[in-house]
Structure formats: C-alpha cells, structure tokens
Amino acid sequence: MIARTSRIAFCAWLFLAGTLSAVAQTYTITEIGVLKGNNESSGFWLNSAGEVVGCSYTGIPNDYPCTGTAGQHAFLWSKSAGLKDLGTMSGGTISGATGINDSGEIVGYSNVKGSSASDFFAFLWTSSGGMTNLGTLSGGHSSCAFEINSAGVIAGDSFISNGNVNAVSWTNNKIKNLGGLAKSIFTAALDINDNNQIVGESIFSYGPPFQSHAFEWSAALGMKDLGTLSGGTTSIANAINASGVMVGQSNAGSFPNDWHAVMWNAARKIQDLGTLAGGTYSVAFGINDSDEVVGYGNISNNDPHAFLWTQAAGMRDLNSLIPANSGWVLINANAINRLGQITGYGIFKGYNHGFLLSPK
C-alpha cells in the first residue's frame, strides 16, 4: 500500500497553471533531509504550495526507503519550516505520510500500542489536532489512508472480517466500504481527485501468475474495471488528475513479465507510455493537471531512474534535467503538483534522501 514500487506494495503485506514547457524544462533540486537519528527518507506526495510529506528512517543504504521498520516516522517538509516529525499514533513505533492537500491536512498510516506491531491504522493529521485514528471496517484489523482531496475526503483501504481487503473512503472521519472488483481478494483506493473520483487496484490472485486490474470508482457509476494493455494480466491505477486522466502500470501479452507506465484518458482508453532508453520496465506514480507524468523505470544497465513523461517529449530521465555534478542519482519520482514541482527520492551522499525538484 505504500507507494512506490506500487503504492500498494508496503501495506499489501499487512493486509496547469504556471507549468513551463517540459520540452526545455530543467529543475533545481532541494534536499528534504532526514529526521534526527535517521539516515534515509522519501517524499511521497506534495501539494500546490510545495509542501512534501513522506517518511524517514534508519535503513539499509541504497535499498528502497520506508518499508515499515521500527523507527520510521512520517514527516511534513516545507521550505520555510524544514522537516517536521509527525510522530506516531498513541504508543506506536512506525508511521508514514502518503498524502497532503492544499489545506495542509495529511493522511497516512501508523501502528498503535496494544495492537500487533505489523498492524497499521489509517490516520488524518492536522496542525491543530495531530493524528486521528480513522479506524477500520467492521472486523478489520488494519487500514491505510493514501490520499486526501481538497474537501477532506480520504481514499484508502481496510481489512474486513474474512481477511480480505476492500477499498474505502472516509468523509468527516466516517468510513465507507467501496468494495472491490468481482472476485478480488485485495483492493486499495490509491488516489482521489476533487470530483471524488477514486482509482486503485484490485488483486485477484497472488499467483503465479499475479493477476490484478486497475479500477475507477465514482458515486454515480460505482467501481469500473479499467482493464490492461492488450494481452495483459495485471494493471494498477496509481493517480488521477482533475480531468479524470489516470496513470499507473500494466503488463501486456508482448511483455508479460514487465510493467510499462500507462495512461487512461478521459474516455478510459489505455496508452502505453513506454520506457526509458535501453529500459525494459516503467511505472507511473503521479500526474498533474497538465498531464505531466512522473515515475520510475530502468535504464540499459538495469539501474532504476526517475522519469518525467509529457505528450510533447515522451519519457525522459529526470537525471538529465537537473544540474550536472549535483551529487544526486534520482531513483523514483512519486508525485508532481500543478506547478510542475516533483518529489521522490534518490541517492545522495551514499543514502536515499527525499527531494523536491522545482522548474527553473
């Protein structure tokens, strides 16, 4: 469920304006840093003000940061205030922040005292109230919140009494069961826009072969299967913008063992966004209202690199768009806001550190 080698990957084990032309776009890079006592961090999401949320922890250098180990804490970063430790819910040891809206409301997950250390609960954090436990569906033992829109509606998932996981939303801290695609065993709502359109993934089988389909949910239409690329068996929708354009990943009959980043347009037609030069796989995690897409994929030596995709320029390695000799290798881009600012993580001084890229 935590982003981002699928945003679902972590919790799965528990249960336009102002954008410059991307053709010539380059970026300045700001290090988000790490919390005291930690040496790794990742930016998961950001709002229109460039405030970034994510997590920081002591982990294995150059491994994927923020995988639910003890000492991992959610953070809020802003240019003016720097890095703020959001702590955990009562008695917890682990937390992570996965979404933030323009009002500064933050969502994520935390464990709590009195429950299994591997059971996490969705939270809503506000500057006035701190962390509020959003609870679970009846009979469920854990949940996760992924994103929050401008009206405060939250998308996430929850275990249910039979041990499966269903997509959920919270409105005014009240949980709603959105269910899943037919015959699914694990469904997560991974993003929500201001029209209350929700996207995510329903898993049918952990395999082999692994089988899942991306979905879109709305109050008017319910849950709709978005399908896959031709001949594919698995897809995920990770993000949706204000126009209802969605991005994620899918395999296909011609590359059954790899994912390619994909886009579903407003008519729900799927498009393969390709890979970086020399690469074999890619995943799209974020999209803004200008249809600029970010994510990661491998390059010719199989190293993962962050990418930016635009209709005009296609997929480009973000490492080619930051200053030379910066000391960074950008590994993954998780989100992009309406101004074109991007957050994610990369290797800096030997460790994974969160970053904020800002258009020049």
Image (cartoon, rainbow, N blue to C red):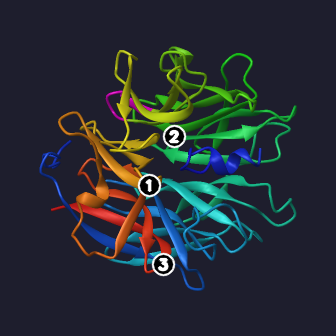
Mark 2–mark 1 CB contact (< 8 Å): no
Q: Which residue is mark 3?
A: 350
Nearer to us in this view, 234 or 339: 234
Relative height, residue 151 to residue 187 (above, below): below
Q: Secondary structure at mark 2?
A: loop
Relative height, residue 181 to residue 207 (above, below): above
Amino acid at the residue labelled 1: Asn
Q: Which residue is mark 1?
A: 301
Q: Seen in the image, is 144 located left or right of residue 297?
A: right
Q: Would residue 127 be visible to someone looking at this image?
A: no
Closer to viewer: mark 1 or mark 3: 1
Amino acid at the residue labelled 2: Val
Q: Residues within 10 Å of mark 1 (few under 14, many from 20)?
A: few
Question: Magenta region: which residues?
Answer: 241-247
Closer to viewer: mark 2 or mark 1: 1
Identified at 59% across, 65% down, the residue is 63
Q: Which residue is mark 2?
A: 153
Q: Could you tell which of marks 1 and 3 lies nearer the N-terminus? A: 1
